[in-house]
Image (cartoon, rainbow, N blue to C red):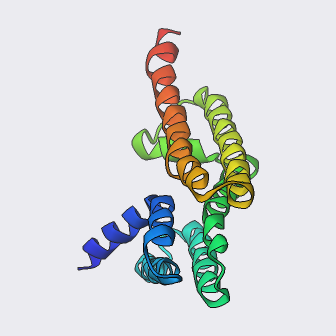
Amino acid sequence: MRALLQVLTALTLLAYPLAVYFGLNYLPAGTIALVLCLLLTVRLILQKQKVKTLVLPLLVGIALTAGSYLAKRSDWLLYYPVVINLTMLALFSYSLHKGPCMIERLARLKEPDLPDEAIPYLKKVTLLWCGLFVLNGTMAAYTAGFTRLATWTLYNGLIAYVLMGLLLGGEWLYRSFWLKKT
């Protein structure tokens, strides 16, 4: 049951923009805020602080969804992607200053004995991710405050994921083919 709840809450968080869009358009007022608040709370309980960096965005998400319901302000639901991007930006930026950088940490999961020459490249990739989080966070804030719900959903539920996928895939291709030639 625990594993099923973890999968359900993870999928819901990934599909958050779509859930908000359909919830605001097709469910009674406040329903999606309560459902999302419940799912975020379950995710927080299941997390048990395994990854401490996920606790803050979950708590802010719970506050946004609960506040949205209590204040009868559905627009508050639109700011969760901003919180996620700010959290990721803070995490990646902090890792650049305190080391090892986030991409190095992730790379060491697969290859613990990375050569020293790889570290500057991994820092550049971490910096690229920081730039993407700035772009996505800015666009998430802009679409939340100044566009229609459909535009917000398109950007935060599709375009932002495509950009992350392009960076992830592009970096992998570059590393796999270009760097191996040198």
Res. 180 visible in picture: yes
Front position in the image: 92 or 40: 40
Res. 95 visible in picture: no
Residue 29 spot, x, y in % from top left = 52, 82
Residue located at (53% from left, 41% from top): 164
Residue located at (51% from left, 71% from top): 24
Residue that lies at the very extreme toward the left in this rendered image: 1
Looking at the image, residue 181 sits to the left or right of residue 89; the answer is: left
Vertically, is 6 above or below 104?
A: below
Vertically, is 81 above or below 105?
A: below
- Quadrant of the image occupied by residue 81: bottom right
Residue 175 spot, x, y in % from top left = 49, 23
Residue that lies at the very extreme toward the top in this rendered image: 181
- Quadrant of the image occupied by residue 159: top right
Residue located at (70% from left, 43% from top): 135
Number of callouts: 0
Residue 66 spot, x, y in % from top left = 59, 85
Vertically, is 58 above or below 167?
A: below
Front position in the image: 101 or 22: 22
Residue located at (37% from left, 62% from top): 11
Residue 89 spot, x, y in % from top left = 69, 53
Q: Quadrant of the N terminus?
A: bottom left
